[in-house]
Amino acid sequence: MELGKINKLKIEKLTDIGAYLIDEKAPKEAHVLLPKKQLPEDAAIGAEIRVFLYKDSKDRPIATVNTPLITKGQVAVLSVKEVNKIGAFLDMGLERDLFMPYKEMNGRPEAGDEVLVRMYEDKSHRLSASMKGLYHLLSMNPPYVIGDQVSARIYEFGHDFGTYAAVDDKYSAMIPRHEDVSHLRIGDVISARVTNVKEDGKLDISLRGKAYEEIETDSEKILSLLREYAGVLPFTEKADPAVIKRETGLTKNAFKRAVGHLYKERLIDLSDGKIRLV
């Protein structure tokens, strides 16, 4: 018998409160209760039955014929039902909710949020949820190619590496660190474009459209910034990428494309190491 998993067990005994189930490969004294309301009408001693094993409110192993939204070692999106001072309770599709301690959270989810989690068994042999350690559990066999538009859920901000996301809540993906994700929070679902499929099957995705689609938006951003700076930017496209990113929110390449576009349209002038509004 394995807690947190679907088990195929045999009915050993029928009682007024339900059926006691056993695993023939386990010690004879190991048995678990399937409550009477869960029993199929044709239940009989010796019959095999597929059940999910978890623990009741008194911390006792119990079986259910209902299929949970997640099993141990699996990744799934669950809804946050309640958050209190010890952690959060997630709806896993059964009568009992799944607990997630604060130390296993990324960010601070709120009631009503949908978050990507894994189920694990803690040191006290209780089933719990974690928003951490998802990276190696996600699939690296995506059906997508470069240029495809996909839906992805943010599950971790990776700081120096980028932002981790799960495409279709299943496939491993990353948004590069130079893209602005300050408006996003854990659990947000975004529309993104596949920019790379790595040899190991991981995806690189971008919030930005193709260069020719973004150039007008980026150009308008620079014009707006120029007006804020009284018509003069104290740097050009030759500036340090960190300066450009800090001041404009654009990568150096995007900034150069937009500046070139504005220059060709004769909306700006480039001289003396500055950009001037014409």
Image (cartoon, rainbow, N blue to C red):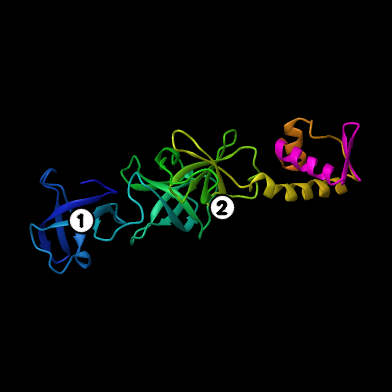
Mark seen at residue 115: none
> Tag 1, which secondary structure?
strand
Q: Is residue 36 left or right of residue 168?
A: left
Rendered view: 154 above or below 197: below
Q: Amino acid at mark 1?
A: Arg
Q: Secondary structure at mark 2?
A: strand
Nearest to N terminus: mark 1 or mark 2:
1
The number of numbered discs placed on residues in the rendered structure image is 2
Q: Is residue 46 left or right of residue 37?
A: left
Residue segment shown in magenta: 253-278
Compared with 163, 54 (above or below) is: below
Magenta-drawn stretch contains 271 = yes
**129 or 165: nearer the viewer:** 165
Label 1, label 2: how far apart the Cα atoms are:
37 Å
Residue reaching furthest to the bottom: 41
Q: Are marks 1 and 2 in contact (CB under 8 Å)?
A: no
* Nearest the eye: 90 or 73: 73
Q: Is residue 260 magenta?
A: yes
Q: Which quarter of the figure has residue 26?
A: top left
Which residue in the structure is indicated by mark 1? 50
| Residue 180 shown left or right of residue 163 in the figure | right
Question: Residue 190 has which mark?
Answer: 2
Q: Residues within 10 Å of mark 2 (few under 14, many from 20)?
A: some
Q: Position of residue 136 (x, y in %)?
A: 42, 37
